[in-house]
Amino acid sequence: MPLLFGVFESDIPKLLRYPSLARVHKLVLGTTRKNNIDLAPLRMYQRLETLFLNNHARNISTLGDLPSVQRLWLSQIAKSVSLRFVGRMEGLRFLTVSLGGRPSTEELAHPKVSHLEVLRVRGLSEIDLSAFPQLQALRIEDQLQLRSLELNTGTIIRWLSIWNCKNLSNLLGLSQASALNSLSLGRTALEPDRILDNTPSSLKCLIISGYGRRRNEELENRIRSKGYTPTISEPDTEGEHD
């Protein structure tokens, strides 16, 4: 049973205390004028699998006590709010962080997250993938402070999309990313020739764009000539709930 709540003018800080709501498996809390919903009662939500929070952070550390949550989306959470509770969420596999602000993904470290999305987080300049040893799919969008990303040795990432990170000029360790199957790069400062010369043997799908129509067409032709498919499907999310 899902519950979606987003009445902007509402003022119900005790909303989640109603026992009848504790049976939901999906909970979406949209932004309200006061953003004052108390999250502490979520300890009683033993069936909760998917949680989306937009701007709500009152007693947010409670989420660390929710082993049933597999998918978490945190939107517009202020950088003053610690997200270290994420590492205690034992069942978490899919994590999205958008808007808000923080300098790095350090507080999001998790041993079992397989899918990570970092979308338009203000001030973020560092993404350390060694903090996500089970990561298989990564989407990064609108991170203008990000200048370098390292695919660390032993990474099992198989799907990577980086879009509108205009100052990203270094993608380190690409040739050693032996599990990478799909790679999409758009509107970055990466040099296309360096990418094409360092692709791993596992790669099958490749997009490099954002250089103007003529250059994009040239790149697509080169990509096809190397035997890659110039299209990227969404990462497979089936069977990821072990």
Image: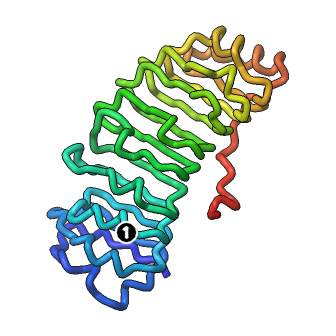
Quarter of the view holding residue 229: top right
Q: Is residue 93 left or right of residue 82?
A: right
Residue 129, percent from left and from top? 50, 35
Residue 223, percent from left and from top? 76, 19
Q: Is residue 196 left or right of residue 162?
A: right
Residue for point 71% across, 20% down:
199
Residue for point 55% across, 52% down:
112
Residue 147, percent from left and from top? 42, 19
Secondary structure at numbered mark 1: helix
Residue named by callout 1: 65
Q: Is residue 122 left or right of residue 180?
A: left
Residue for point 18% across, 77% down:
12
Q: Which color scheme is applied? A: rainbow
Residue for point 61% across, 35% down:
160
Q: Nearer the viewer, residue 63 or 3?
A: 63
Residue type beneath disc 1: Asp
Task: Give the farthest residue toward the bottom.
Answer: 20
> Which corner quadrant holds the C terminus?
bottom right
